[in-house]
Image (cartoon, grey):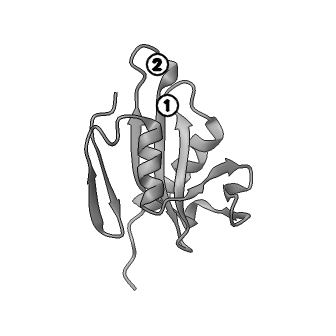
Amino acid sequence: MFHACFYKTNDMITNATTEDMRTLASCVNKLVLDGYTENFQVKDEGMYSPSNNKYYKPEEVHILNFFRFEGASDPADSAILYAIETNDGTKGTLTDAYGPQADLEIEKFLKQVEDISKKPVNPS
């Protein structure tokens, strides 16, 4: 079970109590209140924003934080929630199963996003 939730938004740390962020639904609701309103999806073309009808490439996506939820009695209930912002300022969430039930397409896309984020920046 998830105990506390800390995440970064616009260089400001927002703290929510265990009570506020105990479930996936309550964490999603808190993020929506903080402006993470898009419900992103990963498709063959990239990460899709339904409200903008736009696809994003891995280099246009930034994972600001993630939250893992573990099922108390069933590992199949495990999930991971990503707080995401794109280069054009669209903010939203992406949810996936965690562990063996994870969506391979989402996992592959997010791995590319993570690899891009880890590359050193070359000074100009």
Q: State whether residue 30 is above or below residue 105.
A: below
* Residue drawn where x is 39% and y is 42% of the image: 67
Towards the viewer: 124 or 55: 55
Q: Secondary structure at mark 1?
A: loop
* Residue drawn where x is 41% and y is 34% of the image: 23
39 lies left or right of 29: right
Towards the viewer: 77 or 58: 77
**Looking at the picture, which amino acid does disc 2 mark?**
Pro
* Residue drawn where x is 29% and y is 38% of the image: 19
Q: State whether residue 115 is above or below residue 77.
A: below
Task: Pinpoint residue 17: horizontal percent, then vertical percent.
Answer: 25, 44
Task: Pinpoint residue 85: horizontal percent, then vertical percent.
Answer: 50, 63
The residues tagged by marks 1 and 2 sit, at their Cα atoms, a distance apart of 9 Å
**Mark 2 highlights which residue?**
75
Towards the viewer: 80 or 124: 80
Task: Pinpoint residue 64: horizontal percent, then vertical percent.
Answer: 41, 58
Q: Residues within 10 Å of mark 1 (few under 14, many from 20)?
A: some
Q: Which mark is residue 98?
A: 1
